Image (tube, coloured by chain):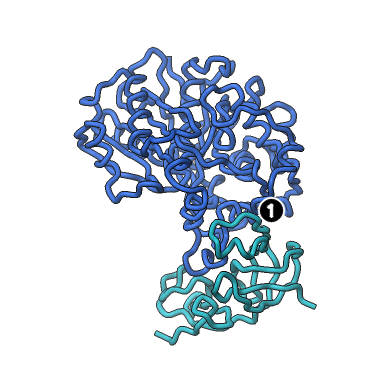
Amino acid sequence: MSFVTGVGLTPFGKHEGSSSLDLMSRAAQAALDDAGLKRAEIDGILCGYSTVSPHIMLATVFAEHFGIRPSYAHAVQVGGATGLAMTMLAHHLVEAGVARNVLVVAGENRLTGQSRDASIQALAQVGHPDYEVPLGPTIPAYYGLVATRCMHEYGVTEEDLAEFAVLMRAHACTHPDAQFHDPITVADVMASKPVAMPLKLLDCCPVSDGGAAFVISRERTGETAVRIRGCAQAHTHQHVTAAPALSELGAEISIARAKEATGLAISDVRYAAIYDSFTITLAMLLEDLGLAGRGEAAARVRAGHFSRDGAMPLNTHGGLLSYGHCGVGGAMAHLVEAHLQMTGRAASRQVRDASIALLHGDGGVLSSHVSMFLERVR
Amino acid sequence: MSERIADWTKGEQAITFQTCGACGHVQYFHRAFCAACGAPDPRDARASGKGRVYATSLVCRAATPETRAHVPYNILLVDCAEGFRMMAHGEPNLAIGDEVTASFPTFAGKLVPFFSKRK
């Protein structure tokens, strides 16, 4: 058994003068404080990567900087799925008795530490170096390809996709630490600058500075405990050129495995924390995971289904699209928010019942998937 | 191992693919083995350059000065007649399902496959 005993999250946006290590440290300290644990009690560290400050041994760089001498430490790299992949590993390490308290941490000054071009270029390298990158694609283009295909097969429209951006912005407006607080409309999304059609600027997550951390422990610390009920992964490809058909993508495989591992069904889920690098990502994942019927996700957004007071509140902090995206820490914010919701600490964003949460991360171009169920234990 | 046929990634006006002699699997990314069954030395061949558009995305925001000069450019996934999928450039108004044929213009200083609607 393992518990998420503490969470930490910085505001996302500009942190002028903060390094990746600074942002990781701030988030880590917040997570330790939240768990009520001291540095000496942390015996495992898992960290993500930093595109601004790449290092072949980032976990020990961080451990030394932060002042921990763990018995287990290394970095993990699965793109946008890294945060949940680290959490899954921490869960197994704790269950196996390898560590008692694993600190999972990531942070990056991706916005102020490098140019936006440098970020876009660094990320485009997930493409094939010989067969894709010479064509000048960008991450939005990889997802743009998926989007046109999805629109073609399922009749999804650009206006449908815009709904997800509007929803995430509405949620971010209620979180003081989100990067964006100006409400937007479907018309605003439609009129925003074209990036990689059909994706426009407001269909894309921003580049942010920020950090996030959790502690995964063998024993619960707080009054209300959040237990990792079970998780699973699926990896079908790396490059979009080699991706399977839309109906055979990894999200459907990983959620099936996670359901089998936990005995839970989608009907048990009360809160959803789903990766949303682009509007198309969120639209597809919601349907692949079974949180909406095929081609119905946008209609459910319009009906308020995924709003704070709806039947399935989703990314109430604003997601990558509007809380922001600082790399690995970006999708970790989804788990931080889920934890706050599950422990009744989400302030004005609090949902009625977050007793069971479904989290899902996606890395690459729908390449790597991690599905995870969290359960509140009183 | 059989001689590798030069393709557009090596500056030649050609698209190549590999067929496994053991299981018949067709692959586009060149390897010394079949990714489906592991058999060594899949057979290299030139593709016809004919295919059908699987997906498109018109890039309007590029990340390097060299690619920015070409904006907007249309990135495609094309299902080639020989049974493999590839990424390429294409005419701006192509639609999914269009029958296309390849040529090899220069993009950012390098030869790239570019698909046009088959007449």
Chain identity of mark 1: A
The residue drawn where x is 41% and y is 32% is A212
Residue A269 visible in rendering:
no
Which quarter of the figure has residue A22?
top left
The residue drawn where x is 59% and y is 21% is A174
Badge 1 amino acid:
Met
For the C terminus of chain A, the quadrant is top left
The one of A175 and B32 positioned closer to us in this rendering: A175
Q: Assign a secondary structure to mark 1.
A: strand
Residue A199 higher or lower than A37, as above or below: below
The one of A313 and B115 positioned closer to us in this rendering: B115
Which quarter of the figure has residue B118?
bottom right
Residue B96 higher or lower than A63, as above or below: below
Chain displayed in cyan: B
- Assess disc 1: are there few (<14), some (14-19) or many (≥20) residues with their C-alpha within 10 Å of its C-alpha: many
Determine the residue located farthest toward the bottom in the rendered image: B3
Q: Give percent across and percent down for residue A74.
A: 28, 43
Chain displayed in blue: A
Which quarter of the figure has residue A277?
top right
Q: On the rendered structure, is A91 left or right of A180?
A: left
Residue A116 visible in rendering:
yes
Pointer 1 residue: A197
For the N terminus of chain A, the quadrant is top left
Q: Give percent across and percent down for residue A221.
A: 33, 17
